[in-house]
Amino acid sequence: MLLSNQNYEMGVFKGFCDQNELVIEVGSQEYVLELNKEEIADVVYHLMHYENLLIPFNKETQKLVLNSDPHYDEGEMEELMNISEGADEHGQK
């Protein structure tokens, strides 16, 4: 994910407090953001799939910049898997 806007910085995930608050550190500033259930799910998805604790953050709007859309289409992946299995049956790889 490329961030070209000068207002974007990478924040360090510090943790969740209460039920719907995220603590993030951007530079030397710590932010506590109130999130809804969908935003919390997006943060969890981001942390699991990018395997690091850095979260893009827009300092101007004080909002997270997350892209939690799957990077593939499940139907396409299933089709590719089926094609791959068929190639194995015919001695091709």
Image (cartoon, grey):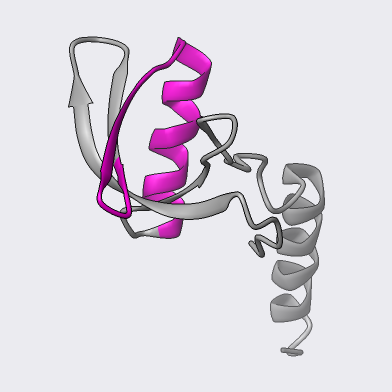
Work out whether residue 57 or residue 48 is closer to the camera in this orientation and state it: 57
Residue at 80% of width from left, 67% of height from top? Answer: 83
Q: Position of residue 76 (x, y in %)?
A: 81, 52
**Left or right: residue 10 compared with residue 89:** left
Work out whether residue 52 or residue 9 is closer to the camera in this orientation and state it: 9
Residue 70 to residue 89: above or below: above
Task: Decide whether residue 31 is among the magenta residues.
Answer: yes
Task: Decide whether residue 15 is among the magenta residues.
Answer: no
Work out whether residue 41 or residue 72 is closer to the camera in this orientation and state it: 41
Q: In which quarter of the image is the C terminus?
A: bottom right
**Left or right: residue 8 compared with residue 88:** left
Q: Where is residue 47 in the image (x, y as percent from the top left)?
A: 38, 47
Q: In which quarter of the image is the N terminus?
A: bottom right
Q: Give the range drawn in magenta.
A: 25-50
Q: Quadrant of residue 21?
A: top left
Residue at 79% of width from left, 83% of height from top? Answer: 90
Q: Position of residue 31 (x, y in %)?
A: 31, 31
**Left or right: residue 70 compared with residue 76:** left
Q: Quadrant of residue 69?
A: top right
Q: Where is residue 6 in the image (x, y as percent from the top left)?
A: 64, 57
Residue at 73% of width from left, 72% of height from top? Answer: 84
Residue at 45% of width from left, 25% of height from top? Answer: 41
Residue 56 to residue 1: above or below: above
Exactly how many numbered labels are in the figure? 0
